[in-house]
Amino acid sequence: MKRNWQYQDIIDLEFFLRQDSNHKGSVLHSRDRQIFLQHFELQRQDIPVVPSALMQLWLQARREEHPEPNTLPGTIAREAHALLRLVLIIFGLISGGSAGLFFFTYAGTTPVNVLHFLVLFVFTQVVFTLIILLRGGALRLGLKSLPPTLSARVMAVLTKKISSYLLRQTHKNLSAEQRLGVNATLGQIKATNATYGSLLLWPLFQLIQILAIGFNVGLLGATFLKVTVSDIAFGWQSTLQFSSQSLHTFVSWMALPWSWLFAAGTAYPTLAEVEGSRIILKEGIAHLQTPDLISWWPFLLLSLIAYGLFFRLLLYCFGIYKEYRSAKSLRFDTPPIRQITRRMLTPVVSTQARPEPTEQAITQPKDLTEEFTETELQERSNPVHLLLPDEICDQCDNSLLAGYLSRRGLNIHNSLRFMVDYESDQQLLEKLAEESWQKSAGIVILMEAWMPPLVSFQIFLKELRAKVGKNLPFTLLLIGKPSPTSPLTPVQDEALFAIWRQKMESLGDPYLELDVLIEEESE
Amino acid sequence: MKSVPIATPEIAIIGHPNEGKSSVLSTLAEDDSVRISATPGETTECRTFPVIIDGREILRFTDTPGFQNPSRVLAEMRKIAETSNDSVAEFRQKFKDVEELHDDVELLLPVERGAGIIYVVDGSRPVRNVDRAEMEILRLTGRPRMAIINCKDDDFGQLESWKNEFRKNFNANRVFNAHRATYAERILLLEALKSIDQDWQPTLNKVVKAFKEDWAARNSATVDILQTLLTECLQYSVSASIQNEKDSTEVQQRLALSYQKTIEEKERLAHEQIRALFKHNIFKYTLPPHSILHEDLFSEKTWHLLGLSKKQVALAGALGGALVGAKLDLLTAGLSFGIFTGIGGAAGAFGALAGGKKLSSGKNILGIDLGGEQIKIGPATNISLLLILINRALLFYQHTINWAHGRRDYTTNLPEPVSAAGSGGFTADWSASQLRTCKAYFSAVTQKDETVMLEEAQKLSVILTDTLAAISRHE
C-alpha cells in the first residue's frame, strides 16, 4: 500500500483509465465506490484523503479484478524491462570484453601506448559523464535547455521541417477517421509525457548506465585477463614534446581518488618509471627496462574503475533516486484521476424515478449533503468559471445547469458568454488571463456535440491554457441538439462523442476532461 | 471584387465540415470517387471535377475543405476589406503559412480564381454564429452564390430558419434531395444554378443538354442489354439423353440445376454491363442489404414478388389469351412457386416452364420429351420469367443510378417498388396494352418467329425506355 509509484503502475493506471473512458459514469461510480468501501470496511482505517494512496488502492483493486493480470501492459513492460536490462548487461560485458581483448592484441612488437588506452576508455567516459552533469546542472539552474550550438540549431530546424512534412504527407493519404486517430494518439502521448514525463524517463536513464557498467566490467575483466596471462609492455609516446615530468604530474593528479589507498609506486608510476617507459620511435624499445614497461597496468585498471565504473555506478544510483523523487512528486490531479477519487469518496445515490432534467431530480444531491464527510463537502464547493456558447447562453436554465454541475461537485462562480465572434473571444481570453485561479476548481465549457469540433475551438482551448496556467482543470461538457423547450439535452450520437473525444485528445492536454453534461440512464 | 478571368466557369462547393458538400458534389459531377465519410474533415485539399463535352472542358466543380475558423476568417477579411479590393486574395496571401488556417485558406482558392459558390448546409440542425460568419464571408467575396440545404436524416425541422438566413445572403437556395435519382437531382441543381448568374446560362444549358443526351444514350444501351438478356434467357434450353425412366428424376434435377445456373449467370453479366454504364467509378459496387435482388432469381420469393400479379393474370387471360395462346392455368402455375420449387413434386410449375405439356400426354412426362430418349428443359413457357427478368433489371438500374444508398453519410434506404404483401414490381403498373406487347414479344421469342420478334422488340423497347426515364425522374 505504501509502495512508491513505479513506471509499470503508471502504465497500468493509464491502461485502466483508457478502458474506463468507454463506460458510463454511473457504472464507474458504483464500481469505484465499491472499491473504496470494501477496503475501508475491512481495514477500518482512517480514510486517506491523499489522492496517491487512493489511487494505489484503486489500481490494486483494478488489477485484482483483471482476468489475466499477466497480460496487463504494466506487467509486460516490467518483464520487457527486466529482459532488456539482462540483454544490455550481457551486451555491455561482451562489448567491453571484446574492446579490451581487441585493444591488447596490438601488444607484442611495440608496447601498448597507455595514452591510447586513456583516451579511448577513460577520457571519453569522463567527457560523457561531464556532459550529463553539466546539462543536469544547467537545467537545475533554471535554463530550459543549453544554449544550442549552430549545428544543434540546424538539426532542430531540419528535424522539425522533415517531421511536419512527413506528417502532412501522411495526412494526405489518410482518411479523416484515420487522421483523427493518429492525432488523438499523438495527443495522448503528449499528455502522458506532460503528466509523468520524468518518471518514465529515469528507467531509461538507468538502462543506459547499466549498459555502461557492463561495458566497464567487461573491459576491466579483459584488461586484467590480458595482463595476467600475457606479457604486455606498456609505454607512452607523443608527437607533442611534453616532458616525462608533466605526464607524471598529470598522472599523479589523475590518481588522486585512489593514491591515498595504495603504497607509493603502485597507485601510479613513479617519475623514473614514466621516464623509463617513454618510447622514442627512432631508438626502438630494446633499451627499455621491463619493470618500467609493466609499471603502468595498476594505474590503468584503477583509472578505469574510478572514472568509468564508479562514475557509472554513481549515475545509476542517481537515476534510481530521481525515479523515486519523480514518483513522489506525482500530482494525481488530472481530471480523470480527480474523477476517480471523487467517485470513490462520493456515496452512490439511486433514485427510482427516471431522472428527467427537472428541478426535483437535480435537487437530490443537495438533499444528501448531510451524508458527506468533511472532505467531500470541500470537494463540493469547488467554484468554476462556466463558458456558454452565445446561441444557448440566453435559453439556458441556470438553476438546472447549476444542478448538473453540482452532481460533479462543482458550483458556478461566474458564467460567461463566448463564441459570439472572434474579437469578443479574444477579449474574453484577455479577461480570463487577469483572473486569479488560486482557489478555482477550473473552467467548465459547454459545447454542442452535434457541431463538429472545429480547429478554431482547439486553438481557443490552447490559448486559454496558455493564459491560465497548465494545471487548471478544464471540463468540456457536451450537450445534444436543442429541444423546443431547452437547449440542455443529452448527447444522442455516440459517434459524434467519439469524434469530440479524439479531437480533444489530440490537444495533448492532461488537464482537459471531456464528458457529457447529462448522462442518459438507459440501463 | 477583382477576379482572375478563367476560361472555364467554375463552381466551388463550400460549407461547414460534415454538412454534405462532397455528396452534393458527387451528384453534380456524377463521380463516386469523391471521398465521403461521417467523420468531419475528410476533405483537406480542393479537388476539381471538370465537365468535359466532346473533349472540351466547359464547366468545373470544385470540392473544398470545410471552414475551420469562420469567425477569425471573417474578422481578418473585414480588416483587409477596409484597405483592399480583393480581400480573398489578400487573405490567402497573408495567411498561407498559418498552419491552423490551412483549410480556410485552401477553401477560398477557387473563389480567388473567380468561381461561383454553392454553399451547402445541413438543414436538420439550427443556425449558429459560425454559420452566419461563413455566410458573411461568402457575401464579402462578392461572387454569385446559391445555398443548398441538405436535410440529413430527413429532418426538416430547421428548414425555415435556414431559408430566412439565406434570403439575406444568397441569390438562390434549394433543398437537396438525397433520395432522388442522381440524374434527376443533378439536372434540377444545374437548372437552379442558372438563376444565380445570367452569364452562366449558355454554359449551363449546354451542360444540361449534354447530360440529358448522355443519360438517354445510357438508358438506350441499358434497353439493348436487357433485350439481349431476355432473348437469350427465354430461348435457352438444355437437354440430355436418358436410358430408362429411373434415370429421369436424377437427370431432370441435373438439367434443372444447369438451366438455373446458366440463366442466373446470364442475368449477372447483364447487370454487370448495366453497372458499368453508370458506376464506372466504383469497382466494388454493392446493392443495399434490404433489396429483393439478393434473393435468387428462381426463389419462391422472387417469383411471388416480381412475377405476374393475380390481377394481371386475369387481365392477361382475358385480353391476350387468344393472341399468346397461353392459358390462364399455365400463367397461374408459376405465380406463387419458384419454378423449380419441389422439383418432381410441383408438377404444375415444372410443366409450365418446360413446355406446357400435360401429364396425360403419352410420351411427355412433366413436359419432358421422353420420346426420343431425350429430356429437355426450355425454352421458357411461363411469361413470369420475362417479367421477373425485366423487374430485376429495372430494380438493379434503380439502385445503380441512385447514389444515396450505401453512402456512409446517409442511412436511409431507397424504397423498392415491391412490398412483401403485393407483387409485380415495376411491371405491376403496366397497362393492358403494354402487357399485351410483353406477351406478343414473349411468344415471338420463344417460338423464334423472327419477323414478329423484331416488331414486338421495337414496341417493348419503347416501353422499357419510358420506364427507365420514369425511374430516372423518380423522387
Image (cartoon, coloured by chain):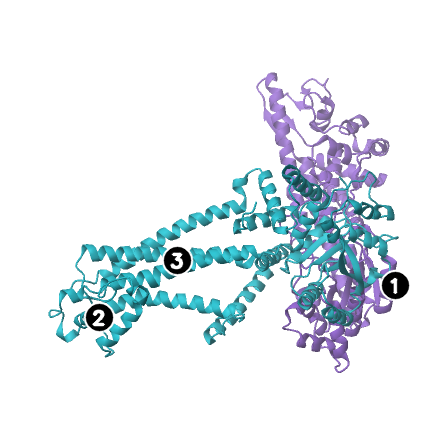
Q: SS for tag 3?
A: helix
Q: Residues within 10 Å of mark 3 (few under 14, many from 20)?
A: some
Q: Disc 1 vs disc 2: which is toward the camera?
A: 2
Q: Are marks 1 and 3 on the same chain?
A: no
Q: Residue A426, located in which quarter of the rendered image?
A: bottom right
Q: Is residue A400 left or right of residue A58?
A: right
Circle on res. A462:
none
Amino acid beneath label 2: Trp
Q: Disc 1 vs disc 3: which is toward the camera?
A: 3
Q: Given the image, what chain letter belongs to the residue carrying mark 1? A: B
Task: Write down which chain is painted cyan.
Answer: A
Mark yes or no: residue B197 visible: yes
Residue A179: percent from the left, percent from the top? 62, 57
Q: Disc 2 vs disc 3: which is toward the camera?
A: 3
Q: Nearer the viewer, residue A491 or A82?
A: A82
Q: Residues within 10 Å of mark 1 (few under 14, many from 20)?
A: few
- The residue that label 3 is drawn on is A313
What colour denotes chain B? purple
Q: What is the CA distance from the residue labelled 1 to the residue labelled 3?
A: 76 Å
Q: Residue A413, located in which quarter of the rendered image?
A: bottom right
Q: Given the image, what chain letter belongs to the residue carrying mark 3? A: A
Q: Nearer the viewer, residue B277 or A386?
A: A386
Quarter holding the N terminus of chain B? Answer: bottom right
Residue B395: percent from the left, percent from the top? 74, 43
Residue at 83 percent across and 63 percent down: it is B173
Q: SS for tag 1?
A: helix
Q: What is the CA distance from the residue labelled 2 to the residue labelled 3?
A: 30 Å
- The residue that label 1 is drawn on is B164
In this view, B362 is above or below A350:
above
- The residue that label 2 is drawn on is A236
Q: Nearer the viewer, residue A352 or B424?
A: A352
Say whether disc 2 or disc 3 marks the residue closer to the N-terminus: 2
